[in-house]
Image (tube, rainbow, N blue to C red):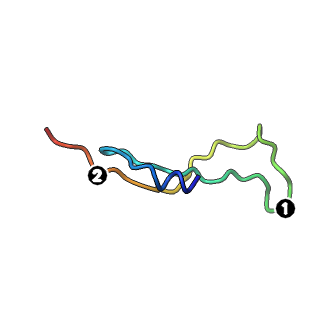
Amino acid sequence: AAAVAKRVIPLLDRVLIQRAEAVTKTKGGIVIPEKAQAKVLKGTVVAIGPGSRNE
C-alpha cells in the first residue's frame, strides 16, 4: 500500500492520508473481534496537493 501511495499525487487542495492500523489486541493480550473494533479515525498524511487555484 505504501508503494501505491508514493505514486499518487493529490490534485488542488486534496490530502492523501494512510489510515492507522486498528487495535486487534489489548495490552492484557485479549483479542478483539472485528465486529467489536471501533472505526479508525487516525492516520498519517502521505501527500498534499499544491493548493487550489484562484480564478
Question: What residue is drawn where x is 84% and y is 61%?
Answer: 28
- Left/right placement of residue 45 relative to residue 53 reads right
- Going by the numbered disc 1, the residue's amino acid type is Gly
Question: What residue is drawn where x is 37% and y is 53%?
Answer: 48
Q: Depth check: 26 or 10 in front?
A: 10
- Looking at the rendered image, the disc whose residue lies closer to the viewer, 2 or 1, is 2
Q: Name the residue under label 2.
A: 50
Task: Of the two numbered discs 2 and 1 on the same chain, state the one appearing first in sequence.
Answer: 1
Q: Position of residue 23 (x, y in %)?
A: 72, 53
Q: Which element carries disc 2, helix, strand or loop?
A: loop
Q: Where is residue 31 in the image (x, y as percent from the top left)?
A: 84, 51
Q: Residue furthest bottom?
A: 27
Please give the label number shown on residue 28. Answer: 1
Q: In this rendering, is residue 39 above or below 17?
A: above
- Going by the numbered disc 2, the residue's amino acid type is Pro
Identify the image quadrant of residue 12.
top left
Question: What residue is drawn where x is 85% and y is 60%?
Answer: 29
Question: What residue is drawn where x is 86% and y is 54%?
Answer: 30
Identify the image quadrant of residue 14.
top left
